[in-house]
Image (cartoon, rainbow, N blue to C red):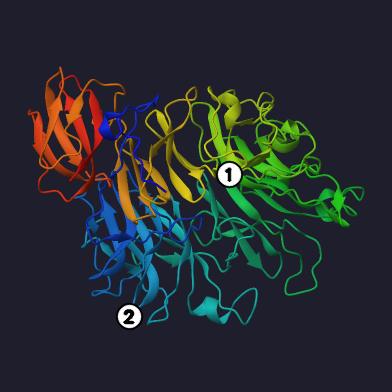
């Protein structure tokens, strides 16, 4: 795709751009020769980046050091390798990065110890293996790292869990551990594995509620069910046998099939198999079994309950309709969004309030049927997903909607595109619809072509703005932004080819992300003023094309002129003059950014010949 940069107030030859919002340019803070290896995607074994108040940890590789742990303070000079854990080009392959206070716990592979738990404070001397849990070169292969107060919870292999597995005698298991970052403070607290593959959410999942953490565990009495830990061996135990139906196998009762375990305030919500021994009503589902349904837990047996009615009523193919409960998003300490099938409208946006009685059709409830609501002929699920936070009372997400625009008869599908829900009331009785992008924008806007998905995702609030990633053309995933809920979203920057940004995070009210196109870590400073552009300025930049000297003409005093490459790097900069020499630059396309005495900033593309 043709390279574009929406930071500009003018195009080549000073042609003006009709843009209604100020834009920003991302600047790479990754040194030359460094490739960021923190992977894109929803897998939690190698999150793109983790961060504290003022530092970002990520994995990256160089030819000399291989794949190692890196850190950044948000500047290029402060972006550096933490420690060459495995000297030479092999690398230690950092995984499972998890912030606990100002320290980063992670796993690393070394020739002498295999894969073990490590911790780092961001310095070489403060980066070390916490404990050789499984001595020699075998490695304990920790996974599921989760911050728990000033400690970290995780699952790991040792000699006992390898020789005496709970579920299958032929398969070694990883059991529950806790660590405070010291060898003596790293101990096994549970003689149980967890599920190592998720049904459709991340595996190794904990829900931390106050001073307790809930997780999926196994025993020969209860099969898979809900467990709780307070970080001690005595406080690690079964909460309740979620599925007490008899099981003719390795355990006495059947599996709970727990998934999407999510903390919401001081309780957790999840989905689990719900059987006649729990419902006590043979008229429900199939002889009282209603299949996968919604449960709530406060970490006690008494406080762990099915909601009391079949959310997804009915049967299909002789089996209960599965609720499809997934994609949980806590809105506050007692209300959560999720998606589910109510047995009538398929999988659509839903909401629950833990502080109100559970009443069918009232709480929890489906907010609306995105497909049938807008286009009654459809019975298809919209599969809402990607919601990550509340932005000034709105939740933005993607959904596969069927939407008919009255003035465009051929446009029937939005694809997996941008929608939003107004949750500002925080009252589930008033939260009752989802709105497609084209219905709230003025003029009407479609990010991608009609009937083409934009796959909007990674919604991240930075200051007063909401950044996200979206596609305005097939295989062109770029960075977009809302300045507020009343304005249309706009594309912040279009990398050459497919930028594919991911790992968006807010640190010190600046945006950081990794771009797949070049595997670099980038920064945007929306509040700095330097990167804000006032559209329609009277500044003139000439000549264009240019061979050596760029001139700037303005009625206001010029404070600074910078020349940038299309990757956002500053290649030349001068203060308090109206010219800049670009003779040493290679021929090509560049950006001239001009800052005036009153703080106004404008920019223009130039061609260097």
The residue lying toward the viewer, choosing from 394 and 425, is 394
Q: Is residue 76 above or below residue 351?
A: below
Give x and y (percent) for residue 52.
34, 46
Give x and y (percent) for residue 451.
62, 41
Q: Which residue is mark 1?
A: 453
The residue lying toward the viewer, choosing from 578 and 37, is 578
Give x and y (percent) for residue 276.
85, 54
> 10 Å neighbourhood of mark 2: few (<14), some, or many (≥20)?
few
The residue lying toward the viewer, choosing from 489 and 580, is 580
The answer to which image quadrant residue 493 occupies is: top left
Task: Residue at 87% x, 57% y: name it.
Answer: 317
The answer to which image quadrant residue 70 occupies is: bottom left
The residue lying toward the viewer, choosing from 154 and 600, is 600
Give x and y (percent) for residue 355.
65, 32
* Element at label 1: loop
Q: Left or right: where does residue 52 sit relative to residue 593?
A: right
Task: Residue at 24% x, 75% y: name it.
Answer: 88
Q: Is residue 377 above or below residue 306?
A: above
- Marking on residue 112: 2
Q: Do the numbered discs 1 and 2 sit on residues whose CB atoms are within 8 Å? A: no
Question: Looking at the image, can residue 43 be seen?
Answer: yes
- Marking on residue 540: none
> 10 Å neighbourhood of mark 1: few (<14), some, or many (≥20)?
many
Which mark is in front, 1 or 2?
Answer: 1
**Label 1, label 2: how far apart the Cα atoms are:** 48 Å
Question: Looking at the image, can residue 268 be seen?
Answer: no
* Element at label 2: loop
């Amino acid at each position: 795709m043709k390279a574009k940069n929406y930071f500009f107030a003018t195009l080549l030859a000073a042609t003006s751009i009709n843009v209604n919002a100020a834009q920003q340019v991302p600047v790479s803070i990754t040194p030359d020769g460094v490739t960021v290896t923190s992977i894109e995607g929803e897998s939690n074994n190698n999150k793109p980046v983790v961060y504290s108040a003022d530092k970002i940890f990520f994995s990256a590789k160089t030819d000399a050091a291989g794949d190692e742990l890196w850190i950044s303070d948000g500047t290029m000079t402060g972006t550096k390798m933490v420690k060459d854990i495995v000297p030479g080009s092999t690398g230690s392959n950092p995984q499972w990065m998890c912030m606990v206070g100002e320290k980063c716990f992670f796993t690393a592979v070394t020739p002498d110890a295999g894969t073990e738990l490590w911790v780092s404070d961001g310095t070489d001397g403060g980066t070390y293996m916490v404990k050789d849990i499984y001595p020699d070169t075998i490695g304990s292969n920790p996974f599921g790292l989760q911050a728990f107060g000033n400690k970290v919870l995780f699952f790991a292999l040792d000699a006992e869990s390898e020789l005496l597995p709970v579920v299958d005698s032929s398969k070694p298991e990883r059991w529950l551990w806790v660590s405070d970052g010291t060898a003596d403070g790293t101990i096994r607290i549970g003689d149980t594995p967890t599920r190592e593959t998720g049904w459709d959410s991340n595996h190794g999942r904990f829900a931390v509620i106050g001073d307790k953490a809930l997780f999926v565990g196994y025993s020969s009495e209860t099969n898979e069910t809900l467990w709780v830990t307070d970080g001690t061996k005595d406080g690690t135990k079964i909460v309740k046998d979620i599925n007490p139906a008899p099981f003719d196998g390795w355990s006495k009762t059947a599996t709970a099939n727990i998934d999407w375990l999510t903390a919401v305030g001081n309780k957790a919500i999840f989905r689990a198999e719900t059987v006649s021994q729990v419902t006590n009503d043979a008229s429900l589902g199939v002889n009282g079994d209603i299949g996968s349904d919604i449960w709530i837990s406060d970490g006690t047996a008494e406080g762990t309950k099915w909601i009391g009615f079949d959310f997804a009523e009915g049967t299909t193919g002789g089996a209960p309709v599965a609720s499809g409960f997934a994609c949980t998003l806590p809105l506050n300490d007692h209300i959560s969004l999720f998606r589910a099938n109510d047995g009538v409208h398929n999988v659509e946006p839903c909401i629950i309030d833990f502080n109100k009685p559970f009443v069918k059709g009232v709480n929890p409830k489906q907010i609306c049927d995105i497909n049938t609501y807008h286009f009654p002929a459809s019975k298809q699920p919209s599969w809402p997903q990607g919601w990550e936070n509340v932005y000034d009372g709105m939740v933005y997400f993607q959904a596969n909607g069927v939407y008919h625009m009255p003035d465009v008869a051929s446009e029937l599908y939005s694809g997996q595109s941008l929608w939003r829900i107004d949750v500002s009331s925080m009252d589930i009785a008033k939260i009752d619809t989802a709105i497609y992008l084209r219905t709230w924008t003025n003029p009407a806007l479609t990010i991608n072509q009609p009937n083409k998905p934009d796959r909007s995702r990674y919604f991240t609030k930075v200051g007063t703005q909401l950044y996200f990633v979206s596609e305005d053309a097939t295989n062109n995933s770029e960075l977009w932004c809302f300045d507020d809920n009343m304005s249309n979203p706009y594309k912040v920057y279009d990398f050459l080819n497919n930028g594919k940004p991911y790992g968006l995070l807010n640190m010190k009210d600046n945006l950081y992300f990794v771009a797949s196109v070049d595997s670099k870590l980038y920064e945007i400073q929306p509040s700095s003023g330097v990167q804000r552009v006032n559209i329609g300025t009277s500044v003139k930049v000439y000549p264009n094309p240019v061979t050596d000297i760029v001139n700037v003409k303005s009625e206001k005093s010029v404070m600074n002129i910078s020349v940038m490459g299309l990757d956002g790097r500053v290649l030349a900069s001068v203060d308090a003059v109206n010219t800049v020499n670009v003779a040493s630059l290679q021929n090509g396309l560049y950006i001239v950014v001009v800052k005036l005495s009153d703080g106004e900033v404008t920019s223009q593309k130039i061609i260097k010949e």
